[in-house]
Image (cartoon, rainbow, N blue to C red):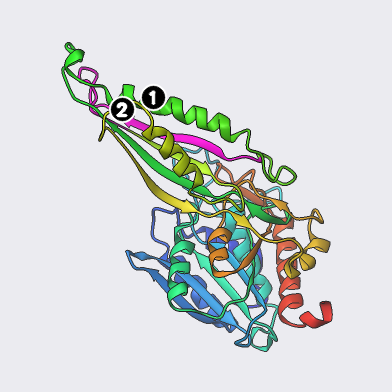
Amino acid sequence: MTISETAPSLLGQLIAFDTVSHRPVMELASFLSERCEDLGFDVQIYPDPDNAQKANVVCQAGPKKTGGLIISGHMDVVPTEDQPWQSDPFQLTELNDKLYGRGTADMKGFIACTLTALARIEVKKLSEPLTLIWTYDEEVGCHGSHKLVEVLKKQPTLLPHEALIGEPTDFRIFRMHPGHVSCQIVTTGLAAHSSKPDLGISAIKRMQTILAAIEHLEADLQKEIKHQNYLERPYVTLNVGSIKGGQAVNIVPDKCEIILGYRPLPGDNPLAVFERLNARLQELPLPAGSLRMSLLNITPALHTPEHQPLEKVLAPIASHPHAGAAAFATDGGNLALLGIHSLIFGPGSIDVAHKANEFIERAALKKGTDIVEKVIRLRCEEPLAYF
């Protein structure tokens, strides 16, 4: 990468990689690895042991000691199918100083800013450690960062204790966010011909009882307020995201399944709501063996303490001087399991993410590049001069 390459041109290259979460990410991982090696980083690729087409990329520069900074982002994007795009979502399109394409805001724009900023810096002369972490499958439950954390727990690696995660926040600082937990609930019954329904037992009717219990728990959770000065919804939100049951209109259904998701608050035990719901369901008058509840995925919440050194750097250049809370989950919850304090901060708006005609403004891309450069210089070149 040359210093003359601009963030928009680099973003165009990143957008061209179709890294929707259910597709391979290795081509982009290799591209980023080569770019970071060219910039002077030592690069380690951590493949998913269960999927050869997935991998995290960890790039390290600077002295081998404590301190410094992590910069992190995810390589995957959400699907575009059945969305009314006005241009090819995997080809960068510019109109009225807005750059359109899948991932422009969430969050390949930030990756482009970072690589462009690094081209202005002599990475090999950094006085403090700088680590880049590019993850996969963040959009479907932060699976990549979860697997990376599990590996790094077993093979300890010296990492900085602060991270800047460049999600689209319109340059606001977020130090906390809810997590996300998903679970499956299955009810079973007895199939029969619908002309003689009394000979069967409807699993869907049994699920009605479950859904009523979930609604009662949801009402209780909305009364349990925390972090009201930070969160727009300062309680655990809950959603039944899918339901499947039955085979045909003339068969009494013998199975019904729902997928439930809830968002534990910062500082909460992520399993607390799962255990509360399970306890309530076990009290229902259902026959033994007709109900099964299982955990699918845990994405931890983030609760970074106030007044971190990185927050001191970001506050004067942020769109708002005080750290708040994001409504969405990030890789920061998993990184916290390694003792890493993350702040969520980046160019672009979450309001256009995941939608058709996602975009980032050209001005935001330039500002993001300048900010990333400044943060790296303040945290990894001459930190003592700043603090």
- Earlier-in-chain disc, 1 versus 2: 1
Query: Which residue shows up at 17% across the image and 11% down it?
Result: 195
Quarter occupied by residue 259? top left
How far apart, in angstroms, are the residues tagged by discs 1 and 2?
A: 9 Å
Q: Image check: 7 left or right of 240?
A: right
Q: Position of residue 139 (x, y in %)?
A: 49, 52
Numbered label attached to residue 349: none
Amino acid type of the residue that numbered disc 1 sits on in the rendered structure: Thr
CB atoms of marks 1 and 2 within 8 Å: yes
- Report the front residue among 209 and 181: 209
Quarter occupied by residue 165? bottom right
Amino acid type of the residue that numbered disc 2 sits on in the rendered structure: Leu
Residue 236 magenta: yes
Query: Which residue shows up at 70% across the image and 61% down it?
Result: 305
Q: Which residue lies furthest to the top in this view?
A: 195
Q: Image check: 331 left or right of 211?
A: right
- Report the front residue among 191 and 104: 191
Any part of residue 9 in sight? no
Q: What stretch is highlighted in magenta?
A: 234-256
Reading the image, the residue beneath label 1 is 209
- Report the front residue among 314 and 254: 254
Mark 2: few/some/many CA within 10 Å (<14, 14-19, 20+): some
Query: Which residue shows up at 49% across the image and 38% down it?
Result: 83
Mark 1: few/some/many CA within 10 Å (<14, 14-19, 20+): some
The quarter of the image holding the N terminus is bottom right
Location of residue 15 with respect to 230 vertically, above or below: below
Q: For the residues carrying marks 1 and 2, which lies nearer the camera in this image?
A: 2
